[in-house]
């Protein structure tokens, strides 16, 4: 089943906070999970409400994010949108893991730097 | 370097990787003497390689090991003959602390910060702090993102990961700045915090990392909010002494199931109080039914209250439950007990004594489990004296009695409620109104508010509606406030001038204000209390407003009440009060 992902962005990473993201990435996947296209949405102001509106408008199936307020997490779930939160790392890595169906809430995808 | 006790200890344990030093100025710094004097006070942080538990461990490794994973455990050398476990030392602090490297990635978090964020050090070690802390200041106000200029004028780096050297900055480096914001923790909870940063320097004074302190402000915010809101019971708010007494009594009153008598002038919040008491009582899940019967003829009021049986009177085509039955299990609130006909008062007394009601036309009593709350805006003792309230009913009702003070007796509550209502309406109307100008506030504080809280609420709504900026100015207030004030001032001037009102007085002989002063003079009353004069002028103004509204609406009271922004019963009461019926 085709799906659309929404990932709030900070540079090329998943934004640390859903409510403070100034940009969002929409990734369109086909029924086999292959990536069809990507589009980037720039927000006039960082806003959870605006991201939720986009998610509903674009019929997003899953939101991949890091920190999110419980209120918006509940809202998106209530709207039957899967929320994979507390994911830290590059957006591309998260998309790849989602397509492989191995992305879980709380995954940390950064390559750790050693002191 | 290397001749301090810390250095010796470091050598003994063989750690080499990392050193953080506190208060260590550059050797070439003008404060070098002080630096030398502090040599023996230096302590170092070093990283112990993992392996068998070290003999100098200061706490069981199980907890620390679990939290820090398999990473080297840092120790502080130089504080005591044996190195001290840094994590255990930081865990003892009541504030959250994170140690970051120059790339702003997390190296260590203490237990308080782990609790705040919901992440353990092992989970987030080596990732950028903005992802683990998720503070509101991280993306746009991070102090490490601001270019720092050293004493030598060199602008150094940002938190992007560049290594930078603040050696020249020495003692003159910026003091740690605290910023307030919030963090979003792992459990999706927003926590208000105060965050501060301090650089960590190596033995040569180079910045090798950062110490990030995060203080939980939840309790502080709650306290601030409580202070700002004052006391509250449901939608009733206030922080004056008079209201404090009411708030103290309310919880017990709510839990009590006996009838409640609420007294207070119009607009003081009797209806709100009755509903709040119901919601705080054990009957909260059952209905709250309000009955305002003062405008109904006696037989209709009786039927409305107790219900009727089919055929009880012409037009009674079917059984009607009445307010009592509608409130079954809950609370019945009667708005103006003094306006109820005496016959109905007798039936209320029967209900209070026996717990049953007699619907109109019924031969059998119907049991009714209802808590009765009644209110009056007049003095109930006076009503009893006038024969308008049955004394036996009054005695039964006054077992539990609450009096809501008029706004003019609530002191600081005027300003407090004004801000409360303006905030409420600003949010509702999506305005940015933050407060009143000094002059507007003085005008409001000088006004006696005969309509009490309801009037203040209406004024706040009016002002917020008209105000397009952040501050309510006098121009945004209703004109009648200034009219009342001007008249009070004029009367005061007259009084001070000591002039007896003559027929040629600028005040119209028809003016109630003039009547007041004249009658005061005739009765030898002192007449030097500005307050009664001000109140008299407001009464006069009200009388004139009513007359004007009736004139404009061709004596149609409903329309006149609407024009005045009052309820029909308020208009009727005021007309009666001023002898205009």
Image (tube, rainbow, N blue to C red):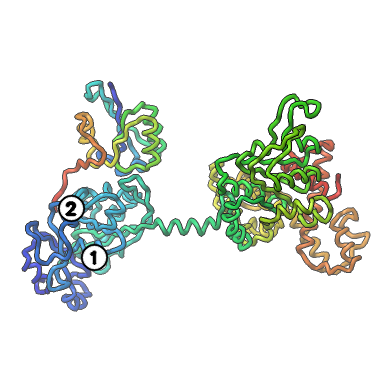
Quadrant location of the C terminus of chain B? top right
Q: Is residue B248 left or right of residue B378?
A: left
Query: In this image, B76 relative to B452: left or right?
Result: left
Can residue B92 be spotted in the picture?
Answer: yes
Judge the density around disc 1: few (<14), some (14-19), many (≥20) Cα neighbours within 10 Å.
Answer: many
Residue B238 falls in image quadrant: bottom right
Q: Secondary structure at mark 1?
A: loop
**Distance of mark 1 from mark 2, alpha carbons?**
39 Å
Question: What is the x, y in percent for residue A14?
Answer: 27, 39
For image coordinates 59% across by 60% down, the residue present is: B244
Q: Nearer the viewer, residue B299 or B119?
A: B299
| Towards the viewer: B522 or B19 | B522
Is A112 displayed left or right of B550 in the figure?
left
Residue under numbered circle 1: B169
Query: Disc 1 is attached to a residue of which chain?
Result: B
Callout 2: SS: helix
Q: Residue at x 34, y 33 (%)?
A: A41
Q: Quadrant of the N terminus of chain B?
A: bottom left
Q: Position of residue B519 (x, y in %)?
A: 89, 62
Q: Which mark is residue B342?
A: none
Q: Position of residue B330 (x, y in %)?
A: 61, 42
Tell me: A51 left or right of B41.
Answer: right
Q: Nearer the viewer, residue B577 or B287?
A: B287
- Label 2: which residue? B66
Give residue A83's quadrant in the image. top left
What percent of the width, then of the height, locates residue B39?
16, 75
Q: Is residue B443 visible?
A: no
Which residue is drawn at the image coordinates 84% and 69% (left, top)? Answer: B526
Give me the residue at 35% from left, 35% from top: A42
Task: Establish if B326 lies above or below B189.
Answer: above
């Amino acid at each position: 089943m085709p799906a659309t992902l929404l990932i709030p962005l900070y540079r090329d990473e998943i934004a640390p906070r859903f409510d403070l993201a100034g940009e969002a990435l929409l990734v369109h996947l086909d029924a086999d999970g292959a990536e069809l296209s990507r589009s980037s949405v720039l927000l006039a102001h960082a806003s959870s409400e605006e991201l939720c509106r986009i998610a509903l408008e674009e019929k997003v199936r899953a939101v991949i994010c890091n920190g999110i307020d419980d209120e918006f997490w509940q809202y998106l779930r209530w709207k039957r949108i899967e929320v994979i939160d507390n994911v830290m790392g590059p957006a591309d890595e998260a998309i790849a893991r989602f397509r492989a169906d191995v992305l879980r809430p709380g995954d940390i995808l950064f390559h750790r730097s050693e002191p | 370097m290397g001749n301090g006790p810390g250095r010796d200890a470091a050598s003994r344990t063989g750690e080499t990787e990392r050193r953080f030093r506190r208060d260590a100025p550059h050797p070439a710094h003008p404060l070098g003497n002080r630096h030398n004097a502090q040599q023996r006070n230096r302590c170092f942080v070093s990283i112990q390689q993992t392996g068998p538990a070290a003999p100098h461990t200061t706490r069981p490794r199980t907890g620390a090991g679990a939290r820090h994973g398999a990473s080297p455990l840092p120790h502080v050398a130089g504080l005591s003959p044996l190195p001290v476990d840094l994590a255990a030392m930081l865990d003892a602090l009541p504030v959250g602390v994170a140690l970051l490297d120059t790339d702003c990635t997390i190296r260590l978090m203490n237990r308080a910060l782990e609790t705040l964020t919901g992440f353990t050090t092992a989970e987030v070690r080596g990732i950028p702090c903005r992802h683990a802390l998720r503070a509101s200041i991280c993306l746009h106000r991070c102090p490490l993102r601001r270019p720092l200029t050293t004493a030598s004028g060199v602008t150094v780096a940002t938190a992007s990961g560049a290594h930078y050297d603040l050696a020249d900055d020495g003692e003159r480096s910026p003091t740690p700045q605290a910023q307030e914001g919030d963090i979003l923790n792992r459990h999706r909870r927003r926590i208000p915090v105060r965050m501060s940063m301090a650089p960590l320097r190596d033995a040569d004074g180079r910045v090798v990392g950062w110490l990030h302190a995060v203080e939980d402000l939840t309790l502080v915010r709650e306290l601030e909010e409580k202070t700002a809101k004052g006391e509250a019971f449901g939608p009733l708010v206030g922080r004056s002494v008079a209201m404090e007494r009411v708030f103290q009594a309310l919880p017990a009153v709510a839990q009590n199931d006996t009838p409640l008598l609420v007294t207070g002038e119009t607009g003081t919040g009797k209806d709100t109080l009755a509903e709040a008491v119901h919601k705080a009582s054990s009957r909260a899940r059952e209905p709250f039914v309000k009955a305002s019967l003062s405008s109904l003829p006696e037989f209709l009021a009786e039927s409305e209250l107790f219900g009727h049986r089919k055929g009880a009177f012409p037009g009674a085509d079917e059984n009607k439950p009445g307010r009592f039955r509608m409130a079954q299990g809950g609370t019945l609130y009667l708005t103006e007990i003094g306006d109820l006909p005496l016959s109905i008062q007798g039936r209320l007394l029967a209900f209070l004594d026996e717990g049953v009601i007699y619907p109109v036309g019924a031969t059998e009593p119907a049991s009714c489990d209802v808590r009765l709350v009644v209110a009056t805006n007049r003095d109930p003792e006076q009503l009893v004296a006038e024969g308008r309230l049955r004394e036996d009913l009054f005695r039964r009702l006054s077992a539990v009695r609450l009096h809501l003070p008029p706004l003019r007796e609530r002191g600081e509550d005027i300003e407090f409620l004004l801000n409360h209502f303006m905030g409420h309406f600003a949010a509702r109307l999506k305005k940015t109104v933050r407060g009143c100008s000094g002059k507007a506030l003085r005008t409001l504080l000088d006004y006696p508010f005969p309509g009490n809280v309801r009037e203040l609420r209406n004024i706040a709504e009016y002002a917020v509606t008209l105000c397009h900026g952040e501050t309510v100015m006098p121009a945004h207030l209703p004109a009648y406030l200034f009219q009342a004030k001007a008249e009070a001032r004029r009367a005061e001037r007259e009084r001070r001038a000591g002039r007896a009102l003559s027929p040629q007085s600028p005040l119209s002989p028809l003016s109630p204000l003039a009547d007041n002063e004249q009658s005061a003079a005739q009765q030898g009353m002192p007449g030097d209390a500005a307050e009664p004069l001000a109140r008299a002028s407001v009464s006069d103004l009200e009388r004139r407003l009513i007359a004007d509204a009736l004139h404009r609406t061709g004596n149609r009271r409903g329309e006149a009440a609407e024009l005045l922004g009052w309820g029909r019963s308020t208009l009727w009461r005021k007309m009666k009060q001023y002898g205009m019926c």
